[in-house]
Image (spheres, helix red, strand yellow):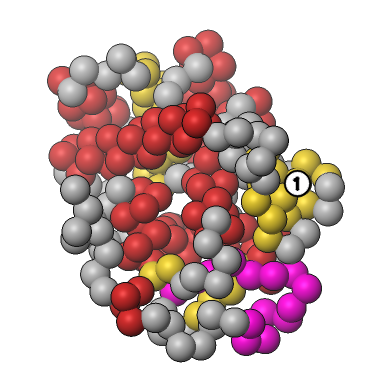
């Protein structure tokens, strides 16, 4: 069963989250400050980390940096206010999803399951892919889905699991415009259309790391793979005249 580390200094919240996750069958470890949180993650190598932003010792941003340095691990970040989430979005932190307090334990568990399902799917894709033939290119960025390695101008670049999945989704279908709802359904497994801001945050993070041209915004529609050779304002094929089928509600006909 999957292991989840909960790093949260507010005891009632930590206890409620841990109890709910345990009742769902997860192995749960709890830490109450930044340094011990990092230590617990290093010791247990969890499948996912639930991470509060404001912590004693050092904050969730620093925890996120330290635990992601060694190996990519999915992070669900807890914030006290929407404005904090906006701030994190601007900082391009590398969390896979955000939840603003107060939240229901049910909502948290749904998010945890969604993130873990996505990581599982990525692992299957990894097993199925042939590295020799599967290298995706978006301008100066090269992606190897089989190894989840990314390079920019030939230099290795660190991407979080979510960032990698977004680039793979867009890069696999150059010229196709994805709505935020479609991206949420494909990457996060969300079917309710909530979380558009989450998509925007990861796109911002990717542009920060890889250059503004890596992903194009198609106003009023969504995002598409960009091309560093073109200016972001250029209109390459596919930017205009989005096919009608892309405007449909995504995921409704999925089995
Ligand atoms: Ca706190």
Q: Residue at x 47, y 84 (%)?
A: 219
> In the rendered view, does 125 fall on the left or right side of 11?
right
- Spot occupied by residue 252 in the image (x, y as percentages of width and height): 19, 61
User: Range of the magenta residues?
Assistant: 222-236
Instruction: Name the secondary structure under disc 1.
Output: strand
- Determine which quarter of the picture holds residue 243: bottom left
Q: Is residue 88 left or right of residue 6?
A: right
Single out the residue that lies furthest toward the right: 154
- Determine crowd level at label 1: few under 14, some 14-19, many 20+ residues with C-alpha closer than 10 A: some
Q: Please give the residue where the numbered disc 1 appears in the rendered image.
A: 151
The chief SS type of the magenta part is: loop
Percent position (x, y) of residue 179?
Answer: 39, 70
Q: Is residue 18 visible?
A: yes
Compared across the picture, whether 162 is left or right of 138 comes to left
Between 60 and 125, the one nearer to me in the picture:
125
- Is residue 81 visible from the viewing direction of this image? no
Residue 173 position, x and y percent, is: 53, 62
Residue extending farthest top: 43
Q: Is residue 49 above or below residue 185?
A: above
Q: Quadrant for the N terminus, please.
A: top left
């Amino acid at each position: 069963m999957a292991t989840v580390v909960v790093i949260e200094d507010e005891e009632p919240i930590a206890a409620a989250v841990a109890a709910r996750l345990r009742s769902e069958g997860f192995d749960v470890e709890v830490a109450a400050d930044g340094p011990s949180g990092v230590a617990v993650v290093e010791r247990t190598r969890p499948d996912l980390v639930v991470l509060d932003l404001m912590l004693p010792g050092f904050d969730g941003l620093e925890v996120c940096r330290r635990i992601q340095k060694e190996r990519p691990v999915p992070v669900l970040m807890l914030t006290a206010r929407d404005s904090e989430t906006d701030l994190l979005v601007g900082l391009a932190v590398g969390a896979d999803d955000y939840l603003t307090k107060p939240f229901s334990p049910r909502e948290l568990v749904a998010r945890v399951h969604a993130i873990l399902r996505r990581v599982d799917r990525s692992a299957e894709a990894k097993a199925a892919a042939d590295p020799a033939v599967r290298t995706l290119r978006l301008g100066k960025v090269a992606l190897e889905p089989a190894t989840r390695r990314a390079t920019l101008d030939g230099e290795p670049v660190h991407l979080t699991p979510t960032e990698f999945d977004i680039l793979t989704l867009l890069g696999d279908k150059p010229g196709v415009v994805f709505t935020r709802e479609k991206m949420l359904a494909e990457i996060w497994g969300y079917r309710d259309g909530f979380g558009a801001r989450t998509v925007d945050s990861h796109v911002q993070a990717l542009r920060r790391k890889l250059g503004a041209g890596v992903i194009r915004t198609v106003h009023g529609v969504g995002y598409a793979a960009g091309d560093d050779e073109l200016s972001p304002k250029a209109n390459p094929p596919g930017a205009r005249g989005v096919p009608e089928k892309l405007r449909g509600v995504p995921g409704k006909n999925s089995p």
